[in-house]
Image (spheres, helix red, strand yellow):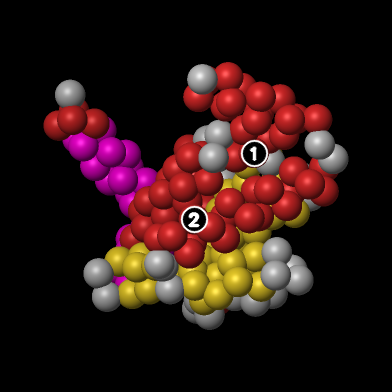
Amino acid sequence: MNKIKFFLQRVYRLTISFNKQEEIVWRELKKLHADADWKHGVYEKDKYIETVFEINKEQVALFLYMVYDGSFHCRVKILQNYPTDVTTDLFILAAHFNNLLTNGVVVVDVNNCCVEYHQKRDLLIPLLYSGEIYDQLIRHHRTSKDIYAAFQRLIIEQEAPAIIIADLLKQKDAKRNDEN
């Protein structure tokens, strides 16, 4: 009986208007935050949520979750007010990440001297699979932590972008081998 109900719910969601689809995903995003009791703020008019999550052991970041233009968006500022003398290396490191990432993009904003990680997903996926909202938040958060650590290493240790990426790939391979 539950399978039929689930199937009919999906069919219904596919047939409703685009605005109603966005509204359903928006409601589910708000419900997820309320149920999880995360520290967050909801901005109803602009349809976005600000949530504070840890990005490393001593640092928190403001994560933004939005529903607009037929997509579910996750954003976080990785760096704010970076020193301008490392701009070229920031672009190189961002390009390395963008070549590796299957979802999302790392953007260097030279006008505001910040680096941001933005991930978006077509609205139909979280519309049809309610657990996908939570899964995307977790994927975005985990990837953000790796990106943050890499950019901190670039800024603080002044390590070359290629070495940072090589070390990150080695860590991921070692972790994957440990899991198998």
Pointer 2 residue: 32
Q: Name the residue located 54 percent from the left edge and 40 percent from the top edge.
A: 130
What range is drawn magenta here?
Answer: 150-175
Q: CA distance from mark 1 to mark 2?
A: 14 Å
Q: Tell me which corner region of the image, top left, top right, bottom left or bottom right, holds residue 36.
A: bottom left
* Residue 90 in sight in this render: no
- Circles 1 and 2, Cβ within 8 Å, touching? The answer is no
In this rendering, is residue 57 above or below 172?
Answer: below
Q: Main secondary structure of the magenta part?
A: helix
Q: Is residue 169 magenta?
A: yes
Of callouts 1 and 2, the N-terminal one:
2
Q: Tell me the residue at 80%/30% (across/down).
A: 15
Name the spot of residue 79 as percent of width and height, x first: 48, 71
Residue 59: x, y in percent?
A: 33, 74
Disc 2, SS: helix
Amino acid type, mark 2: Leu
Q: Outermost residue toward the left?
A: 178
Q: Residue 24, how many percent across, how many down?
A: 68, 48
Seen at 59% across and 67% down, the residue is 49
Say whether residue 79 is left or right of residue 58: right
- The residue type indicated by label 1 comes to Leu
The stretch drawn in magenta includes residue 32: no
Q: Secondary structure beneath disc 1?
A: helix
Is 126 left or right of 101, judged from the image as shown?
Answer: right
Give 40 or 82, whichever is nearer the viewer.
Answer: 40
Comparing 158 with 40, the one in front is 40
Q: Quadrant of the C terminus?
A: top left
Residue shown at 65%/30% (left/top)? Answer: 9
| Residue 58, disc | none
Residue receiving disc 1 = 127
